[in-house]
Every structure is written in structure tokens, then in C-alpha cells.
Image: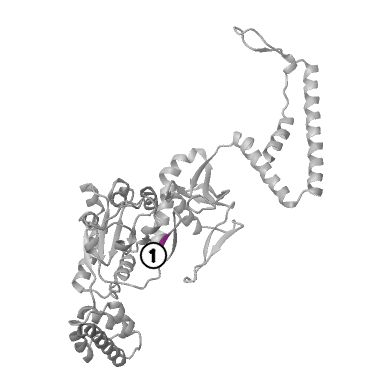
């Protein structure tokens, strides 16, 4: 409505001179006009002045009516539309400015330039910005300051001025990703600097933001909300020093991870996607989830926790996986329980679900899996034997790690972490019990939390182990 009204007003002020002096000629001749006489020139000027006066009078009446009868919100909206109309239909025709638009999303994936620019601008916002968006994570001390919607910021790089603005387009209803609006950044500059922006300014912003992220890198945990990944900061304290597992296996895993992140050019040379798969198998409570967190903390990789029961089809799975970022870990926990991806040779195999094994394998190992670099895929399972061999073959799950019940080595790691000791007389007694009774590292850790005194904690652990042994023998005796 506002645009239509503005167009009508603007048409009123556009004179059409010389109409009375124009005449049509045959097609084979050119269009001619008679030179206007002095009298006709005066008449044209009078008509222009009369039109301007009429428009001015109309504008005064509209201003008084709007001020007396229209709410403030409507007047502000009208003013914004007027400014926008003048800028787009009048000023832009004579402007030498050029604008680039960076949407928040590029199809199903994040737009790297948008995210980099947002981070870059958050570190450079000055007092000239009138409104900013301020947030704070409960687990952090510093505030996060970012541009607010419809605000502008002028940046200067190598003597060239660039104007950034953040825009938001509200959606009439939530889209399939759960979003309520679509955001974009606009970059405006003199058109002669287009090549400079593409070849120098934008690469500078990406490199600067990447350095900033690495300096303040925090691991994030992503989970699905609809078809859209939502993140929170991962505060899991697990490290390789605190994970209770065989020292030899732990050393092998760390070396394998280091070798993986250092071999980008090797993967390109041999024509393979830069990704690595790990299968963690073992009974519940043996530390599989803690090991995943330790890997993420060690590499500073974000975790994408994928629950396959939330996925309805192969196409949906592909879309979701395309939304994951580089330098990340895709985790599917308890894959033996989440969907029917069991051994196809087993009699109980059933493929009534829409998410088929072939579709799952293509998503993690097909052509679409090459749309990203430096990615790790981790499956955890309690029953490795029921999984389809195609799911765990080399090239998909490159390294298989068995997480066992508590061993003497794992016990000493836990005692060192929880009680800050390395030797105690009761440790030998527990070593004897370990060979006869299975107890998970999670159960041992729970017992060590009961008391900080080593004598009391280890004494209680011995009693716990012996009670477990007695319960295991009782059914056999019956």
C-alpha cells in the first residue's frame, strides 16, 4: 500500500514536456519534434510550478492528517517506506555504490562468509553503532556483543570504506528447519572496489575470524531440532588423562588422531575424502561416551549427536548430514538399538522402515560425504556382532576399539583421578577380584566418589566388588 501511494505521488511530479509539439511520422522516417517557442517554454514552466505547488499542498495536508489521526507506528513505517522508495528509485540510479548480499544459509549448509563476517564485526563494533545485541553464556564471564538487526557499521580496510548492515526477513510461518526469519548481511562500497573485495577484503575477514575462533575455540554439541542443528557449549571434562582404558590402546588412538589431522594433502593425493571412522564397542558403562568427549576436547572438534530414530527417510538423512561443518565429529550412539541396521544375513533382519541400510551407508560414505573436510564418524554399540558387516568394514569404521570392564590399568587411572594417589595396599586385593568379577569403570568411579579418604573409598570399593561376586555366584548355587 505504501509503495503504491509513493509511486502515485512521484508520478504527479513528473512533467511531460513538449507533448503538444510532437507529432507522429511514417515508419520509414524518424520521430521529430518542433523546437519549442518562447511562449510554449513559459507555459511548460508554469505547468511544472503548478504541479509542484499542488504536490507540496497535498503533502502538507497528508502530513497534518497523518500526525493527527495515524498512530506513531504507521507514520514510522510510512517514513521508512518513503526513504526506501527514494533510495531505490531515485538515488540508486545516480549512485556509484555496489552491494553484496550474504545470506545466513547456503542451501542446507551455513554460509561461511556470513558466519565469518558476523564474528569479524563483533570484534570491531564501535560507538557509532546505536544498537547492539548483547548475550552471555552462564558458563562464561565475558559478554557477546553483535550487530542488531537494521543497524549499520562502517569498516575501513586499506583506506577503503565498507558499510555493513544486518537485515532480517520474517517468515509468515516456521519453515521446515524451524526458523522464524531469514537473516542476511549487506556489504556496500564503491563499485570500483569489487575485485578488491573479492580478492583481498573477504579473504582477510575469513582468515581473521578463523584465527579468532582458534584462539577462543570452545567445543559445541549439536543436536537436531526438526531438520536444523542447534548447539550448546560442551562442558564435558573428559580428557585422555581421565578416561579409564588400556594405556596401549589409548596411545594408539592418540597417534591415529594426530596422523589423521596432519594428512590433508595425503588424502587429496590418494583421492579419498578426508574423514576417519571409529567403532567403539563394549558393555554399557565402559566409557564409550566419555571417550567421544575426550576426542572432541583433544582435537577441539564440535560434536554432532545424531539420533537415527528422529530420521524418517534417506533424503532427510542426507539433508541433515549436509548441514554439518568441517572439523567435526558425527556420533551415532547405540547404533545397534537406534534403527534396523543389523546384519542382513540374520533371520530377524527386517527393512520395513523408510531409512534403509543402503541409504545410511551412502550418506556417510557416498558422494555426498565428500562435501566437507576433516570429519570423524564415531559409532558406539553394545553388541558389535549384530551389526551388518558392510556398516563396520574398513573405509567406514577404520579403527575398532573395544571398551572392556575395569582392568588393573583402568583401576589405577581412576584411583589417580579421583583420589590423587598411585599406590595403596588395597589395590592388590582389588586386582585379585578383577580377574573373577566384572565391574564397569562407571561403577568404580561411582564408588570412589563416596569419600575422598583413600582408605574409606577403597575399602568400600572392595566390599562392593565382593558383594557383586556373591550375587553372581548365588544363582549358580541355586
> Does the magenta segment cover residue 367?
no
**Tag 1 residue:** 219
Q: Residue at x 29, y 81 (%)?
A: 444
For the N terminus, give its image quadrant: top right
Report x, y in % for residue 439: 25, 79
Report x, y in % for residue 200: 42, 46
Which of 70 and 478 lies nearest the eye of the viewer? 478
* Mark 1 burial class by Cα count in 10 Å: few <14, some 14-19, many 20+: many
Q: Residue at x 78, y 18 (%)?
A: 40
Report x, y in % for residue 376: 30, 58
Residue 232 visible, this angle? yes
Which of 329 and 188 lies nearest the eye of the viewer? 329
Q: Residue at x 78, y 34 (%)?
A: 55
Decide if residue 114 is on the left or right side of residue 65: left
> In the current view of this chain or complex, which residue is farthest to the front?
478
Decide if residue 453 is on the left or right side of residue 201: left
**Count of marks, rendered view:** 1
Which of 207 and 108 lies nearest the eye of the viewer? 108
Residue 306 visible, this angle? no
Q: Magenta stretch: give its range.
A: 217-223
Decide if residue 421 is on the left or right side of residue 154: left
Q: Secondary structure at mark 1?
A: loop
Decide if residue 69 is on the left or right side of residue 265: right
Looking at the picture, does residue 345 appear above or below residue 411? above
Report x, y in % for residue 138: 49, 71
Q: Quadrant of residue 58?
A: top right
Looking at the picture, does residue 441 appear above or below residue 254? below
For the C terminus, give its image quadrant: bottom left
Looking at the picture, does residue 90 appear above or below residue 76? above
Amino acid at each position: 500500500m505504501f509503495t503504491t501511494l509513493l509511486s502515485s505521488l512521484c508520478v504527479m511530479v513528473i512533467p511531460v514536456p513538449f507533448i503538444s509539439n510532437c507529432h507522429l511520422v511514417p515508419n520509414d522516417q524518424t520521430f521529430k519534434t518542433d523546437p519549442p517557442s518562447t511562449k510554449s517554454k513559459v507555459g511548460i514552466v508554469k505547468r511544472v510550478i503548478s504541479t509542484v505547488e499542488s504536490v507540496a499542498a497535498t503533502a502538507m495536508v497528508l502530513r497534518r492528517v497523518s500526525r493527527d489521526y495515524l498512530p506513531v507506528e504507521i507514520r514510522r513505517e510510512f517514513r521508512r517506506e518513503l526513504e526506501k522508495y527514494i533510495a531505490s528509485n531515485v538515488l540508486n540510479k545516480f549512485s556509484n555504490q555496489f552491494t553484496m548480499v550474504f545470506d545466513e544459509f547456503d542451501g542446507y549448509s551455513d554460509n561461511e562468509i556470513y558466519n565469518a563476517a558476523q564474528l569479524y564485526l563483533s570484534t570491531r563494533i564501535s560507538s557509532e553503532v546505536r544498537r547492539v545485541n548483547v548475550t552471555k553464556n552462564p558458563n562464561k564471564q565475558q559478554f557477546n556483543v553483535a550487530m542488531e538487526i537494521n543497524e549499520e557499521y562502517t569498516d575501513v580496510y586499506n583506506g577503503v570504506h565498507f558499510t555493513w548492515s544486518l537485515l532480517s526477513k520474517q517468515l509468515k510461518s516456521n519453515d521446515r528447519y524451524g526458523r522464524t526469519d531469514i537473516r542476511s548481511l549487506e556489504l556496500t562500497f564503491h563499485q570500483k572496489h569489487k575485485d578488491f573485495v573479492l580478492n583481498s577484503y573477504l579473504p582477510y575477514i575469513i582468515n581473521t575470524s578463523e584465527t579468532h575462533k582458534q584462539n577462543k575455540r570452545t567445543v559445541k554439541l549439536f543436536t537436531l531440532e526438526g531438520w536444523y542443528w542447534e548447539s550448546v557449549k560442551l562442558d564435558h571434562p573428559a580428557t585422555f588423562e581421565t578416561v579409564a582404558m588400556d594405556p596401549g590402546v589409548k596411545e594408539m588412538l592418540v597417534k591415529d588422531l594426530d596422523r589423521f589431522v596432519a594428512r590433508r594433502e595425503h588424502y587429496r593425493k590418494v583421492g579419498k575424502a578426508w574423514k576417519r571412522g571409529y567403532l567403539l564397542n563394549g558393555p554399557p558403562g565402559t566409557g564409550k561416551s566419555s571417550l567421544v568427549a575426550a576426542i572432541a576436547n583433544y582435537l577441539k572438534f564440535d560434536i554432532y549427536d545424531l539420533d537415527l530414530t528422529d530420521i524418517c527417510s534417506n533424503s532427510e538423512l542426507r539433508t541433515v548430514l549436509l548441514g554439518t561443518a568441517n572439523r567435526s565429529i558425527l556420533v551415532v550412539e547405540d547404533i545397534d538399538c537406534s534403527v534396523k541396521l543389523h546384519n542382513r544375513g540374520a533371520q530377524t533382519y527386517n527393512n520395513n522402515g523408510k531409512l534403509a541400510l543402503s541409504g545410511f551407508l551412502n550418506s556417510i560414505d557416498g558422494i555426498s560425504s565428500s562435501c566437507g573436510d576433516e570429519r570423524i564418524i564415531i559409532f558406539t554399540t553394545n553388541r558389535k556382532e549384530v551389526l551388518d558387516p558392510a556398516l563396520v568394514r574398513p573405509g567406514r569404521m577404520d579403527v575398532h576399539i573395544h571398551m572392556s570392564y575395569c582392568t588393573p590399568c583402568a583401576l589405577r587411572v581412576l584411583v589417580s583421578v579421583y583420589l590423587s594417589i598411585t599406590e595403596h595396599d588395597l589395590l592388590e586385593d582389588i586386582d585379585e577380584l578383577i580377574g573373577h568379577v566384572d565391574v564397569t569403570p562407571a561403577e568404580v568411579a561411582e564408588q570412589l566418589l563416596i569419600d575422598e579418604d583413600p582408605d574409606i573409598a577403597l575399602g568400600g570399593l572392595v566390599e562392593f566388588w565382593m558383594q557383586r561376586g556373591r550375587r553372581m555366584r548365588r544363582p549358580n548355587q541355586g
